[in-house]
Image (spheres, rainbow, N blue to C red):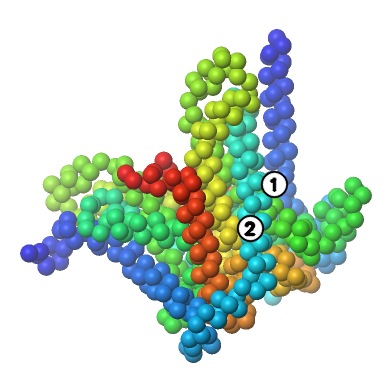
Amino acid sequence: MANFSFKGFLYSQKVAPYLFVSPFVLTFLIFFLYPTASTITMSFQEVQGLTSTKFIGLDNYRRMFDEHFFNALKTNTIYTLLSLMLLIPVPILFAVFLNSKWIKGRTLFKSVIFIPALTSVIVAGVSFRLMFGEADTALINSVIGKLGISPQNWILNYGTGMMLMVILNTWRVAGINMVYYLAGLQSIPEELYESAEMDGANGFTRFYWITLPLLKPIIIYTLTIGIFEGYRMFGESYVFWNEGMPGDIGLTIVRFIYQQAFQRNDMGMGSAIGITLLLIVLTVNMVQLKLFGLFKKEED
Amino acid sequence: MNTKLKKKLLTVSMIIFFLIVCFIVLFPLYYMFMASFKSSKELFRNGMDFRIIPSLMSLDNYKLLFSGKGSVYMFWYRNSLGITVLHTVLSLFLSSLVGYGLAAYSFKGRNVIFTLVLFVMMIPLEILMLPLYKLIVKMGIINTYAGVILPFVVSPMAIFFFRQYVTGISKDFMDAGRIDGCSEFGIFFRIMAPLMQPAFGAMGILLAMQSWNSFIWPLIVLRTNTMFTIPIGLASLMSPYGNNYDMLIAGAVLAIIPVILLFLFNQKAFISGLSTGGVKG
Protein backbone atom coordinates (compact mmCIF):
# COMPACT_ATOMS: atom_id res chain seq x y z
CA MET A 1 0.00 0.00 0.00
CA ALA A 2 1.04 3.55 -0.59
CA ASN A 3 2.61 5.46 2.19
CA PHE A 4 0.28 8.33 3.01
CA SER A 5 2.77 10.63 4.70
CA PHE A 6 3.43 13.94 2.97
CA LYS A 7 7.03 13.02 2.36
CA GLY A 8 6.01 9.76 0.78
CA PHE A 9 3.73 11.74 -1.47
CA LEU A 10 6.54 13.90 -2.77
CA TYR A 11 8.79 10.93 -3.38
CA SER A 12 6.28 8.58 -4.93
CA GLN A 13 6.72 8.06 -8.64
CA LYS A 14 3.17 6.74 -8.74
CA VAL A 15 1.48 9.81 -7.28
CA ALA A 16 3.73 12.54 -8.69
CA PRO A 17 2.55 12.40 -12.32
CA TYR A 18 -1.05 12.91 -11.24
CA LEU A 19 -0.07 15.97 -9.24
CA PHE A 20 1.86 17.31 -12.21
CA VAL A 21 -1.09 17.01 -14.58
CA SER A 22 -3.69 18.16 -12.03
CA PRO A 23 -3.70 21.83 -13.15
CA PHE A 24 -4.88 20.73 -16.59
CA VAL A 25 -7.41 18.25 -15.25
CA LEU A 26 -8.90 20.86 -12.90
CA THR A 27 -9.16 23.65 -15.45
CA PHE A 28 -10.42 21.19 -18.04
CA LEU A 29 -13.28 20.13 -15.77
CA ILE A 30 -14.19 23.62 -14.55
CA PHE A 31 -13.50 25.78 -17.58
CA PHE A 32 -14.07 23.37 -20.45
CA LEU A 33 -16.24 20.38 -19.66
CA TYR A 34 -18.72 22.18 -17.44
CA PRO A 35 -19.17 25.16 -19.83
CA THR A 36 -19.52 22.79 -22.78
CA ALA A 37 -22.30 20.91 -21.02
CA SER A 38 -23.85 24.18 -19.95
CA THR A 39 -23.82 25.68 -23.46
CA ILE A 40 -25.38 22.53 -24.93
CA THR A 41 -28.14 22.78 -22.33
CA MET A 42 -28.63 26.49 -22.89
CA SER A 43 -28.99 25.95 -26.62
CA PHE A 44 -32.26 24.13 -25.88
CA GLN A 45 -33.47 26.76 -23.42
CA GLU A 46 -34.91 30.21 -23.32
CA VAL A 47 -32.53 32.02 -21.01
CA GLN A 48 -33.66 35.18 -19.27
CA GLY A 49 -31.07 36.95 -17.21
CA LEU A 50 -28.62 34.60 -15.57
CA THR A 51 -30.93 32.31 -13.67
CA SER A 52 -34.38 31.96 -15.22
CA THR A 53 -34.50 29.25 -17.88
CA LYS A 54 -37.16 27.30 -19.73
CA PHE A 55 -36.76 24.32 -22.06
CA ILE A 56 -37.98 25.12 -25.55
CA GLY A 57 -36.61 22.19 -27.53
CA LEU A 58 -35.16 23.07 -30.91
CA ASP A 59 -36.63 26.57 -31.05
CA ASN A 60 -33.28 28.34 -30.80
CA TYR A 61 -31.92 26.32 -33.69
CA ARG A 62 -35.03 26.98 -35.75
CA ARG A 63 -34.87 30.73 -35.09
CA MET A 64 -31.15 30.83 -35.66
CA PHE A 65 -31.19 29.80 -39.30
CA ASP A 66 -32.31 33.17 -40.58
CA GLU A 67 -30.74 35.39 -43.20
CA HIS A 68 -28.34 36.92 -40.65
CA PHE A 69 -26.81 33.55 -39.83
CA PHE A 70 -26.30 32.71 -43.48
CA ASN A 71 -24.89 36.17 -44.14
CA ALA A 72 -22.42 35.59 -41.31
CA LEU A 73 -21.50 32.13 -42.56
CA LYS A 74 -20.99 33.51 -46.06
CA THR A 75 -18.80 36.34 -44.76
CA ASN A 76 -16.62 33.93 -42.76
CA THR A 77 -16.25 31.61 -45.73
CA ILE A 78 -15.33 34.33 -48.22
CA TYR A 79 -13.02 35.95 -45.67
CA THR A 80 -11.26 32.64 -45.02
CA LEU A 81 -10.86 31.82 -48.71
CA LEU A 82 -9.53 35.27 -49.64
CA SER A 83 -7.17 35.31 -46.66
CA LEU A 84 -5.78 31.89 -47.58
CA MET A 85 -5.33 32.93 -51.20
CA LEU A 86 -3.01 35.67 -49.94
CA LEU A 87 -1.54 34.12 -46.81
CA ILE A 88 -0.12 31.04 -48.51
CA PRO A 89 1.44 32.24 -51.81
CA VAL A 90 2.68 35.65 -50.62
CA PRO A 91 4.67 34.36 -47.62
CA ILE A 92 6.06 31.52 -49.77
CA LEU A 93 7.26 34.08 -52.28
CA PHE A 94 8.89 36.17 -49.53
CA ALA A 95 10.50 33.09 -48.02
CA VAL A 96 11.87 31.78 -51.32
CA PHE A 97 13.36 35.17 -52.18
CA LEU A 98 14.81 35.65 -48.70
CA ASN A 99 16.30 32.17 -48.82
CA SER A 100 18.03 32.66 -52.16
CA LYS A 101 21.77 33.10 -52.13
CA TRP A 102 21.63 36.36 -54.06
CA ILE A 103 19.69 38.38 -51.54
CA LYS A 104 21.41 40.90 -49.28
CA GLY A 105 20.04 42.25 -45.99
CA ARG A 106 18.09 39.07 -45.29
CA THR A 107 17.82 39.52 -41.50
CA LEU A 108 16.67 43.11 -41.75
CA PHE A 109 13.92 42.35 -44.27
CA LYS A 110 12.76 39.35 -42.28
CA SER A 111 12.50 41.40 -39.08
CA VAL A 112 10.62 44.25 -40.73
CA ILE A 113 8.08 41.94 -42.37
CA PHE A 114 7.57 40.28 -39.00
CA ILE A 115 6.79 43.52 -37.09
CA PRO A 116 3.00 43.59 -37.80
CA ALA A 117 2.70 40.25 -35.98
CA LEU A 118 3.45 42.16 -32.78
CA THR A 119 0.42 44.41 -33.01
CA SER A 120 -3.04 43.69 -31.71
CA VAL A 121 -5.84 43.70 -34.22
CA ILE A 122 -7.46 46.67 -32.47
CA VAL A 123 -4.35 48.81 -32.36
CA ALA A 124 -3.47 48.07 -35.98
CA GLY A 125 -7.11 48.53 -36.90
CA VAL A 126 -7.04 52.12 -35.63
CA SER A 127 -4.51 52.92 -38.32
CA PHE A 128 -6.41 51.10 -41.07
CA ARG A 129 -9.64 52.82 -40.07
CA LEU A 130 -8.01 56.20 -40.49
CA MET A 131 -6.25 55.33 -43.74
CA PHE A 132 -9.50 54.08 -45.21
CA GLY A 133 -11.53 56.99 -43.86
CA GLU A 134 -14.56 58.15 -45.81
CA ALA A 135 -13.37 61.74 -46.33
CA ASP A 136 -12.12 62.62 -49.84
CA THR A 137 -8.87 63.74 -48.28
CA ALA A 138 -8.34 60.54 -46.28
CA LEU A 139 -5.21 58.78 -47.42
CA ILE A 140 -6.50 55.99 -49.64
CA ASN A 141 -9.31 58.08 -51.07
CA SER A 142 -6.89 60.83 -51.99
CA VAL A 143 -4.60 58.30 -53.67
CA ILE A 144 -7.34 56.71 -55.76
CA GLY A 145 -8.65 60.22 -56.44
CA LYS A 146 -5.39 60.97 -58.25
CA LEU A 147 -6.02 57.88 -60.37
CA GLY A 148 -9.44 59.21 -61.26
CA ILE A 149 -11.50 56.91 -59.06
CA SER A 150 -14.23 58.53 -56.99
CA PRO A 151 -13.84 58.39 -53.19
CA GLN A 152 -15.29 55.35 -51.46
CA ASN A 153 -17.12 54.93 -48.21
CA TRP A 154 -15.14 51.79 -47.48
CA ILE A 155 -17.06 50.36 -44.55
CA LEU A 156 -20.52 50.87 -46.03
CA ASN A 157 -20.07 48.47 -48.91
CA TYR A 158 -19.87 44.68 -48.65
CA GLY A 159 -17.01 44.22 -51.09
CA THR A 160 -14.79 46.99 -49.79
CA GLY A 161 -15.62 46.07 -46.20
CA MET A 162 -14.50 42.51 -46.86
CA MET A 163 -11.37 43.85 -48.48
CA LEU A 164 -10.51 45.89 -45.38
CA MET A 165 -10.77 42.84 -43.13
CA VAL A 166 -8.69 40.66 -45.46
CA ILE A 167 -6.02 43.34 -45.85
CA LEU A 168 -5.76 43.91 -42.10
CA ASN A 169 -5.48 40.15 -41.50
CA THR A 170 -2.93 39.62 -44.28
CA TRP A 171 -0.85 42.53 -43.06
CA ARG A 172 -0.67 41.06 -39.56
CA VAL A 173 -0.18 37.37 -40.35
CA ALA A 174 2.02 37.26 -43.49
CA GLY A 175 5.21 37.67 -41.45
CA ILE A 176 4.46 34.71 -39.19
CA ASN A 177 3.70 32.42 -42.11
CA MET A 178 6.86 33.61 -43.83
CA VAL A 179 8.89 32.49 -40.82
CA TYR A 180 7.30 29.03 -40.99
CA TYR A 181 8.15 28.73 -44.68
CA LEU A 182 11.69 29.98 -44.13
CA ALA A 183 12.21 27.29 -41.50
CA GLY A 184 10.88 24.73 -43.98
CA LEU A 185 13.14 25.94 -46.78
CA GLN A 186 16.21 25.79 -44.60
CA SER A 187 15.61 22.10 -43.99
CA ILE A 188 15.72 21.32 -47.74
CA PRO A 189 19.22 20.04 -48.56
CA GLU A 190 21.15 22.27 -50.97
CA GLU A 191 22.35 19.21 -52.95
CA LEU A 192 18.84 18.63 -54.25
CA TYR A 193 18.89 21.98 -56.00
CA GLU A 194 22.44 21.53 -57.22
CA SER A 195 21.77 18.20 -58.86
CA ALA A 196 18.57 19.58 -60.41
CA GLU A 197 20.53 22.50 -61.74
CA MET A 198 23.05 20.14 -63.32
CA ASP A 199 20.17 18.33 -64.97
CA GLY A 200 19.26 21.66 -66.50
CA ALA A 201 16.19 22.48 -64.45
CA ASN A 202 15.45 26.20 -64.42
CA GLY A 203 14.35 28.24 -61.39
CA PHE A 204 10.65 27.65 -61.81
CA THR A 205 10.98 23.91 -62.45
CA ARG A 206 13.11 23.56 -59.35
CA PHE A 207 10.54 25.49 -57.31
CA TYR A 208 7.67 23.39 -58.62
CA TRP A 209 9.30 19.95 -58.33
CA ILE A 210 11.48 20.38 -55.26
CA THR A 211 10.46 23.33 -53.11
CA LEU A 212 6.69 22.99 -53.21
CA PRO A 213 6.48 19.24 -52.46
CA LEU A 214 8.91 19.59 -49.57
CA LEU A 215 6.98 22.54 -48.16
CA LYS A 216 3.74 20.58 -48.27
CA PRO A 217 3.54 19.84 -44.51
CA ILE A 218 3.97 23.53 -43.73
CA ILE A 219 1.44 24.54 -46.36
CA ILE A 220 -1.05 22.16 -44.76
CA TYR A 221 -0.26 23.56 -41.34
CA THR A 222 -0.80 27.19 -42.38
CA LEU A 223 -3.95 26.13 -44.22
CA THR A 224 -5.33 24.47 -41.07
CA ILE A 225 -4.54 27.47 -38.88
CA GLY A 226 -5.96 29.80 -41.54
CA ILE A 227 -9.28 27.99 -41.64
CA PHE A 228 -9.44 27.80 -37.85
CA GLU A 229 -8.72 31.50 -37.46
CA GLY A 230 -10.99 32.43 -40.36
CA TYR A 231 -14.11 30.87 -38.86
CA ARG A 232 -13.53 32.30 -35.39
CA MET A 233 -12.70 35.81 -36.59
CA PHE A 234 -14.03 38.64 -34.43
CA GLY A 235 -11.52 41.47 -33.96
CA GLU A 236 -11.19 42.39 -37.63
CA SER A 237 -14.93 42.87 -37.76
CA TYR A 238 -15.22 44.67 -34.41
CA VAL A 239 -12.54 47.19 -35.23
CA PHE A 240 -14.33 48.45 -38.35
CA TRP A 241 -17.94 48.10 -37.25
CA ASN A 242 -17.90 48.31 -33.46
CA GLU A 243 -21.25 50.05 -33.13
CA GLY A 244 -23.37 48.46 -35.78
CA MET A 245 -23.27 47.16 -39.28
CA PRO A 246 -25.71 48.20 -41.98
CA GLY A 247 -26.93 45.25 -44.02
CA ASP A 248 -24.80 42.72 -42.10
CA ILE A 249 -21.57 44.03 -43.67
CA GLY A 250 -18.78 42.44 -41.68
CA LEU A 251 -21.13 40.27 -39.62
CA THR A 252 -19.29 37.06 -38.73
CA ILE A 253 -20.48 34.02 -36.80
CA VAL A 254 -18.70 34.97 -33.58
CA ARG A 255 -19.93 38.54 -34.00
CA PHE A 256 -23.43 37.13 -34.36
CA ILE A 257 -23.03 35.14 -31.12
CA TYR A 258 -21.77 38.24 -29.35
CA GLN A 259 -24.68 40.31 -30.68
CA GLN A 260 -27.34 37.80 -29.67
CA ALA A 261 -25.89 37.07 -26.25
CA PHE A 262 -24.57 40.38 -25.00
CA GLN A 263 -26.50 42.99 -26.95
CA ARG A 264 -29.89 41.26 -27.29
CA ASN A 265 -29.47 39.21 -24.11
CA ASP A 266 -30.47 36.00 -25.88
CA MET A 267 -28.04 33.44 -24.42
CA GLY A 268 -30.06 30.52 -25.67
CA MET A 269 -29.76 31.45 -29.30
CA GLY A 270 -26.15 32.53 -28.77
CA SER A 271 -25.42 29.03 -27.50
CA ALA A 272 -27.19 27.41 -30.43
CA ILE A 273 -25.02 29.41 -32.86
CA GLY A 274 -21.95 28.44 -30.81
CA ILE A 275 -22.76 24.73 -31.08
CA THR A 276 -23.29 25.13 -34.82
CA LEU A 277 -19.92 26.86 -35.14
CA LEU A 278 -18.34 24.01 -33.18
CA LEU A 279 -19.83 21.49 -35.60
CA ILE A 280 -18.55 23.49 -38.58
CA VAL A 281 -15.02 23.71 -37.15
CA LEU A 282 -14.96 20.01 -36.22
CA THR A 283 -16.23 18.98 -39.67
CA VAL A 284 -13.66 21.09 -41.46
CA ASN A 285 -10.94 19.67 -39.19
CA MET A 286 -12.04 16.09 -39.79
CA VAL A 287 -12.21 16.53 -43.56
CA GLN A 288 -8.75 18.03 -43.50
CA LEU A 289 -7.26 15.35 -41.29
CA LYS A 290 -8.75 12.74 -43.54
CA LEU A 291 -7.50 14.42 -46.71
CA PHE A 292 -3.99 14.99 -45.48
CA GLY A 293 -3.65 12.07 -43.09
CA LEU A 294 -2.31 14.08 -40.18
CA PHE A 295 -3.43 11.39 -37.75
CA LYS A 296 -0.55 9.19 -38.82
CA LYS A 297 1.95 11.75 -37.62
CA GLU A 298 0.55 11.94 -34.12
CA GLU A 299 1.53 8.38 -33.25
CA ASP A 300 4.88 8.19 -31.65
CA MET B 1 31.04 38.34 -67.10
CA ASN B 2 27.55 38.06 -68.42
CA THR B 3 26.37 35.72 -65.67
CA LYS B 4 27.99 37.97 -63.09
CA LEU B 5 25.99 40.89 -64.38
CA LYS B 6 22.86 38.79 -64.37
CA LYS B 7 23.38 37.82 -60.74
CA LYS B 8 23.96 41.43 -59.75
CA LEU B 9 20.78 42.41 -61.52
CA LEU B 10 18.93 39.67 -59.66
CA THR B 11 20.25 40.90 -56.31
CA VAL B 12 19.32 44.48 -57.05
CA SER B 13 15.82 43.65 -58.21
CA MET B 14 15.21 41.50 -55.16
CA ILE B 15 16.39 44.26 -52.86
CA ILE B 16 14.09 46.73 -54.62
CA PHE B 17 11.23 44.24 -54.27
CA PHE B 18 11.79 43.92 -50.52
CA LEU B 19 12.20 47.65 -50.05
CA ILE B 20 8.75 48.08 -51.55
CA VAL B 21 7.38 45.30 -49.34
CA CYS B 22 8.93 46.89 -46.25
CA PHE B 23 7.44 50.25 -47.20
CA ILE B 24 3.96 48.70 -47.44
CA VAL B 25 4.45 46.80 -44.19
CA LEU B 26 5.69 49.78 -42.19
CA PHE B 27 3.39 52.34 -43.72
CA PRO B 28 0.35 51.87 -41.44
CA LEU B 29 2.59 52.17 -38.38
CA TYR B 30 4.43 55.18 -39.74
CA TYR B 31 1.19 56.94 -40.56
CA MET B 32 -0.33 56.23 -37.22
CA PHE B 33 2.77 57.72 -35.67
CA MET B 34 2.58 60.87 -37.81
CA ALA B 35 -1.17 61.20 -37.25
CA SER B 36 -0.72 61.07 -33.51
CA PHE B 37 0.73 64.58 -33.65
CA LYS B 38 -2.30 66.05 -35.39
CA SER B 39 -5.37 67.46 -33.69
CA SER B 40 -8.44 65.27 -33.62
CA LYS B 41 -10.46 67.96 -35.40
CA GLU B 42 -7.99 67.92 -38.24
CA LEU B 43 -7.98 64.11 -38.31
CA PHE B 44 -11.72 63.86 -38.40
CA ARG B 45 -12.12 66.51 -41.05
CA ASN B 46 -9.40 65.31 -43.37
CA GLY B 47 -8.88 61.71 -42.35
CA MET B 48 -5.26 60.75 -42.31
CA ASP B 49 -3.84 62.45 -45.35
CA PHE B 50 -0.45 62.71 -46.94
CA ARG B 51 0.39 66.19 -45.80
CA ILE B 52 2.84 66.74 -43.00
CA ILE B 53 2.41 70.29 -41.77
CA PRO B 54 4.61 71.10 -38.77
CA SER B 55 2.44 74.04 -37.70
CA LEU B 56 -0.55 71.70 -37.31
CA MET B 57 1.41 69.17 -35.29
CA SER B 58 1.78 69.06 -31.54
CA LEU B 59 2.15 66.77 -28.55
CA ASP B 60 -1.34 67.65 -27.34
CA ASN B 61 -2.71 64.15 -27.93
CA TYR B 62 -0.04 62.67 -25.72
CA LYS B 63 -0.47 65.31 -23.03
CA LEU B 64 -4.14 64.41 -22.95
CA LEU B 65 -3.31 60.85 -21.94
CA PHE B 66 -1.70 62.09 -18.77
CA SER B 67 -4.37 64.56 -17.72
CA GLY B 68 -8.08 65.25 -17.67
CA LYS B 69 -10.44 62.90 -19.49
CA GLY B 70 -7.58 60.96 -21.01
CA SER B 71 -5.91 59.96 -17.77
CA VAL B 72 -7.96 56.76 -17.66
CA TYR B 73 -5.42 55.51 -20.20
CA MET B 74 -2.93 55.04 -17.37
CA PHE B 75 -5.35 52.58 -15.76
CA TRP B 76 -5.61 50.67 -19.03
CA TYR B 77 -1.86 50.46 -19.29
CA ARG B 78 -1.56 49.24 -15.73
CA ASN B 79 -4.28 46.63 -16.28
CA SER B 80 -2.72 45.39 -19.50
CA LEU B 81 0.68 45.06 -17.84
CA GLY B 82 -0.76 43.44 -14.71
CA ILE B 83 -2.85 40.91 -16.57
CA THR B 84 -0.07 40.08 -19.03
CA VAL B 85 2.54 39.51 -16.31
CA LEU B 86 0.26 37.49 -14.04
CA HIS B 87 -1.15 35.44 -16.89
CA THR B 88 2.25 34.67 -18.39
CA VAL B 89 3.94 33.71 -15.13
CA LEU B 90 1.07 31.53 -13.90
CA SER B 91 0.55 29.93 -17.28
CA LEU B 92 4.25 29.13 -17.73
CA PHE B 93 4.38 27.55 -14.28
CA LEU B 94 1.23 25.44 -14.54
CA SER B 95 1.55 24.46 -18.19
CA SER B 96 5.17 23.40 -17.76
CA LEU B 97 4.19 21.17 -14.82
CA VAL B 98 1.57 19.44 -16.96
CA GLY B 99 3.76 19.15 -20.05
CA TYR B 100 6.56 17.76 -17.92
CA GLY B 101 4.25 15.29 -16.20
CA LEU B 102 3.00 14.00 -19.54
CA ALA B 103 6.49 13.55 -20.94
CA ALA B 104 8.50 12.35 -17.97
CA TYR B 105 6.25 9.66 -16.52
CA SER B 106 4.24 6.81 -17.92
CA PHE B 107 1.08 6.42 -15.90
CA LYS B 108 -2.45 5.21 -16.29
CA GLY B 109 -4.58 7.76 -18.10
CA ARG B 110 -1.66 9.59 -19.68
CA ASN B 111 -2.85 9.05 -23.22
CA VAL B 112 -6.37 10.12 -22.35
CA ILE B 113 -5.13 13.37 -20.86
CA PHE B 114 -2.81 14.05 -23.77
CA THR B 115 -5.65 13.44 -26.22
CA LEU B 116 -7.80 15.89 -24.25
CA VAL B 117 -5.03 18.49 -24.48
CA LEU B 118 -4.96 18.10 -28.26
CA PHE B 119 -8.74 18.23 -28.39
CA VAL B 120 -8.97 21.49 -26.45
CA MET B 121 -6.35 22.97 -28.78
CA MET B 122 -8.72 22.32 -31.69
CA ILE B 123 -11.73 24.08 -30.16
CA PRO B 124 -12.09 27.83 -30.66
CA LEU B 125 -12.70 29.44 -27.26
CA GLU B 126 -15.36 31.73 -28.71
CA ILE B 127 -17.78 28.82 -28.59
CA LEU B 128 -17.52 28.72 -24.81
CA MET B 129 -17.63 32.44 -24.10
CA LEU B 130 -21.30 32.51 -23.07
CA PRO B 131 -21.23 29.68 -20.50
CA LEU B 132 -17.84 30.91 -19.30
CA TYR B 133 -19.31 34.35 -18.81
CA LYS B 134 -22.13 32.88 -16.72
CA LEU B 135 -19.62 30.88 -14.71
CA ILE B 136 -17.41 33.90 -14.06
CA VAL B 137 -20.44 35.87 -12.87
CA LYS B 138 -21.43 33.01 -10.56
CA MET B 139 -17.90 32.81 -9.17
CA GLY B 140 -18.02 36.53 -8.44
CA ILE B 141 -14.92 37.36 -10.46
CA ILE B 142 -16.53 39.36 -13.24
CA ASN B 143 -14.66 42.61 -13.91
CA THR B 144 -11.47 41.36 -12.22
CA TYR B 145 -8.03 40.24 -13.36
CA ALA B 146 -8.89 36.76 -12.07
CA GLY B 147 -11.91 36.62 -14.36
CA VAL B 148 -9.75 37.38 -17.39
CA ILE B 149 -6.92 35.03 -16.44
CA LEU B 150 -8.38 31.99 -14.67
CA PRO B 151 -10.30 30.25 -17.48
CA PHE B 152 -7.21 30.27 -19.70
CA VAL B 153 -4.49 30.00 -17.09
CA VAL B 154 -3.46 26.56 -18.33
CA SER B 155 -2.57 26.74 -22.02
CA PRO B 156 -2.97 23.48 -23.99
CA MET B 157 -0.63 24.81 -26.63
CA ALA B 158 2.07 25.47 -24.03
CA ILE B 159 1.49 22.02 -22.49
CA PHE B 160 1.98 20.47 -25.90
CA PHE B 161 5.16 22.44 -26.47
CA PHE B 162 6.65 21.64 -23.05
CA ARG B 163 5.79 17.98 -23.51
CA GLN B 164 7.60 17.87 -26.84
CA TYR B 165 10.58 19.62 -25.32
CA VAL B 166 10.87 17.36 -22.28
CA THR B 167 10.56 14.26 -24.47
CA GLY B 168 13.90 15.30 -25.94
CA ILE B 169 15.68 15.48 -22.56
CA SER B 170 17.39 12.33 -21.32
CA LYS B 171 15.68 10.53 -18.43
CA ASP B 172 19.12 9.87 -16.92
CA PHE B 173 18.97 13.31 -15.34
CA MET B 174 15.90 12.24 -13.39
CA ASP B 175 17.45 9.01 -12.20
CA ALA B 176 20.57 10.85 -11.10
CA GLY B 177 18.36 13.17 -9.06
CA ARG B 178 16.58 10.25 -7.44
CA ILE B 179 19.87 8.65 -6.45
CA ASP B 180 20.89 11.94 -4.86
CA GLY B 181 17.69 11.88 -2.79
CA CYS B 182 15.64 14.49 -4.62
CA SER B 183 11.85 14.28 -4.36
CA GLU B 184 9.92 14.08 -7.63
CA PHE B 185 9.19 17.80 -7.37
CA GLY B 186 12.75 18.55 -6.43
CA ILE B 187 13.78 16.84 -9.66
CA PHE B 188 11.46 19.13 -11.61
CA PHE B 189 12.43 22.38 -9.91
CA ARG B 190 16.17 21.79 -9.42
CA ILE B 191 17.13 19.66 -12.40
CA MET B 192 14.60 19.63 -15.20
CA ALA B 193 13.21 23.19 -15.12
CA PRO B 194 16.67 24.72 -15.65
CA LEU B 195 17.17 22.36 -18.60
CA MET B 196 13.85 23.55 -20.03
CA GLN B 197 14.94 27.19 -20.08
CA PRO B 198 14.78 27.69 -23.88
CA ALA B 199 11.23 26.34 -23.86
CA PHE B 200 10.29 28.79 -21.09
CA GLY B 201 11.73 31.62 -23.17
CA ALA B 202 9.84 30.79 -26.34
CA MET B 203 6.56 30.10 -24.54
CA GLY B 204 6.95 33.18 -22.33
CA ILE B 205 7.09 35.45 -25.36
CA LEU B 206 4.20 33.72 -27.08
CA LEU B 207 1.94 33.71 -24.01
CA ALA B 208 2.79 37.31 -23.14
CA MET B 209 1.99 38.53 -26.65
CA GLN B 210 -1.25 36.58 -26.69
CA SER B 211 -2.26 38.04 -23.35
CA TRP B 212 -1.21 41.61 -24.22
CA ASN B 213 -3.19 41.52 -27.47
CA SER B 214 -6.15 39.41 -26.41
CA PHE B 215 -9.47 41.01 -27.13
CA ILE B 216 -12.75 39.14 -27.09
CA TRP B 217 -12.56 37.56 -23.62
CA PRO B 218 -11.40 40.70 -21.76
CA LEU B 219 -14.08 42.61 -23.70
CA ILE B 220 -16.69 40.38 -22.10
CA VAL B 221 -15.24 40.17 -18.59
CA LEU B 222 -14.11 43.75 -17.98
CA ARG B 223 -17.12 45.99 -17.38
CA THR B 224 -15.86 49.31 -15.99
CA ASN B 225 -13.71 51.93 -17.64
CA THR B 226 -10.92 51.79 -15.06
CA MET B 227 -10.61 47.99 -15.38
CA PHE B 228 -10.20 47.94 -19.19
CA THR B 229 -7.02 46.75 -20.86
CA ILE B 230 -5.54 48.83 -23.69
CA PRO B 231 -7.32 47.08 -26.61
CA ILE B 232 -10.68 47.17 -24.81
CA GLY B 233 -10.21 50.79 -23.82
CA LEU B 234 -9.22 51.83 -27.34
CA ALA B 235 -12.17 49.95 -28.82
CA SER B 236 -14.47 51.82 -26.43
CA LEU B 237 -13.22 55.09 -27.92
CA MET B 238 -14.13 54.21 -31.47
CA SER B 239 -17.18 56.08 -32.56
CA PRO B 240 -18.30 57.24 -35.96
CA TYR B 241 -18.19 60.85 -34.78
CA GLY B 242 -14.45 60.99 -34.40
CA ASN B 243 -14.63 62.86 -31.12
CA ASN B 244 -12.04 60.63 -29.45
CA TYR B 245 -9.49 60.35 -32.22
CA ASP B 246 -6.90 62.29 -30.23
CA MET B 247 -6.85 59.77 -27.38
CA LEU B 248 -7.36 56.78 -29.65
CA ILE B 249 -4.41 57.37 -31.88
CA ALA B 250 -1.91 58.49 -29.25
CA GLY B 251 -3.03 55.56 -27.10
CA ALA B 252 -2.50 53.12 -29.96
CA VAL B 253 1.01 54.44 -30.60
CA LEU B 254 1.97 54.17 -26.93
CA ALA B 255 0.65 50.59 -26.89
CA ILE B 256 2.83 49.53 -29.82
CA ILE B 257 6.12 51.32 -29.12
CA PRO B 258 7.28 49.28 -26.09
CA VAL B 259 6.53 46.01 -27.88
CA ILE B 260 8.48 47.06 -30.96
CA LEU B 261 11.40 48.18 -28.79
CA LEU B 262 11.42 44.83 -26.96
CA PHE B 263 11.32 43.10 -30.33
CA LEU B 264 14.24 45.09 -31.74
CA PHE B 265 16.44 44.01 -28.82
CA ASN B 266 15.39 40.33 -28.86
CA GLN B 267 14.50 39.67 -32.48
CA LYS B 268 15.56 36.03 -32.58
CA ALA B 269 13.73 35.14 -29.38
CA PHE B 270 10.57 36.90 -30.53
CA ILE B 271 10.52 35.32 -33.97
CA SER B 272 11.14 31.82 -32.70
CA GLY B 273 8.76 32.35 -29.77
CA LEU B 274 5.88 33.69 -31.81
CA SER B 275 6.20 31.01 -34.43
CA THR B 276 6.40 28.04 -32.06
CA GLY B 277 2.63 27.92 -32.00
CA GLY B 278 3.50 25.71 -34.93
CA VAL B 279 3.59 22.01 -34.32
CA LYS B 280 7.15 20.94 -34.78
CA GLY B 281 8.08 17.81 -36.65
**Is residue A258 shown to the viewer in this render?**
no
Across the whole image, how many numbered discs are drawn on residues? 2
**Is A290 left, or right, of A103 in this rendering?**
left
Q: Judge depth for marks 1 and 2 and give the one in front.
A: 2
Tag 2 secondary structure: helix
Label 1 sits on residue: B26
**Is A263 left, or right, of B36 in this rendering?**
left
Determine crowd level at label 1: few under 14, some 14-19, many 20+ residues with C-alpha closer than 10 A.
some
Q: Residue at x 60, y 38 (%)?
A: A92
Give coordinates of residue A14: x percent, y percent.
17, 58
Is the same chain shared between marks 1 and 2?
no
Alpha-carbon span between mark 1 and mark 2: 29 Å
**Is residue A250 shown to the viewer in this render?**
yes
**Is B93 left, or right, of A16 in this rendering?**
right
Determine crowd level at label 2: few under 14, some 14-19, many 20+ residues with C-alpha closer than 10 A.
some
Q: Residue at x 13, y 51 (%)?
A: B181
Q: Residue at x 54, y 42 (%)?
A: A219
Give coordinates of residue B98: x percent, y percent.
32, 57
Q: Residue at x 69, y 29 (%)?
A: B14
Chain hosting mark 1: B
Label 2 sits on residue: A77
**Image quadrant where residue B165 sits:** top left
- Amino acid carrying label 2: it is Thr
